Image: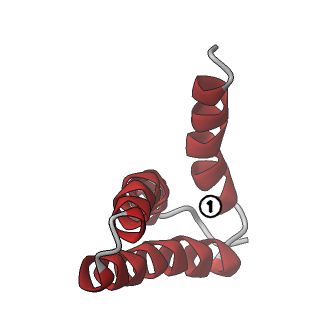
Amino acid sequence: MAAIDPLTAGGVLLATAATDAVYVMFTSAVVARRRVPAATWSSVWYLLSSYAVISYTENWIYVAFASRHCDRRVARMRGR
């Protein structure tokens, strides 16, 4: 198993966290029927998601860094 690169681990965590904010902006643009901003936010959303996915397909341990953010998000949604 390859060693964990702290920079990549942090990047995965930040990309996963930023995906939430970008998704909100994308949804807002879609609801407002603003095509160009929706397309722009969609491309940023895919870029961030692909970075996280590519990173943890190279080394599965990076899934832990992505899931750490998801655990907090689910707990927040449940009111914990």
Q: Is residue 80 placed above or below 29 in the rendered structure?
A: above
Residue appearing at x 61%, y 75% in the figure: 53
Instruction: Say few, some or many: other residues with alpha carbon within 10 Å of mark 1 (under 14 / 14 to 19 / 20 or more).
Output: many
Residue 14 is situated, as x and y percent measured from the top left of the image, at 39, 54
Res 35 → quadrant: bottom left
> Which sits in the foreground, 33 or 7?
33
> Which sits in the foreground, 33 or 27?
33
Residue 41 is situated, as x and y percent measured from the top left of the image, at 34, 74
Residue appearing at x 41%, y 55% in the figure: 24
**Side of 39 where 36 appears, left or right:** left
Residue 58 is situated, as x and y percent measured from the top left of the image, at 65, 81
Name the residue beneath numbered marker 1. 62
Q: Is residue 13 placed above or below 22 in the rendered structure?
A: above
The structure's colour scheme is secondary structure
Residue 6 is situated, as x and y percent measured from the top left of the image, at 43, 56
Res 1 → quadrant: bottom right
Total label count?
1
**Side of 5 where 59 appears, left or right:** right
SS class of the residue under badge 1?
Answer: helix
**Side of 31 where 79 appears, left or right:** right
Residue appearing at x 41%, y 79% in the figure: 42
Q: Is residue 79 placed above or below 72 in the rendered structure?
A: above
Residue appearing at x 41%, y 63% in the figure: 31
Q: Is residue 43 placed above or below 18 in the rendered structure?
A: below
Res 43 → quadrant: bottom left
> Which sits in the foreground, 48 or 35?
35
Looking at the rendered image, the quarter that the C terminus falls into is top right
Residue type at tag 1? Tyr
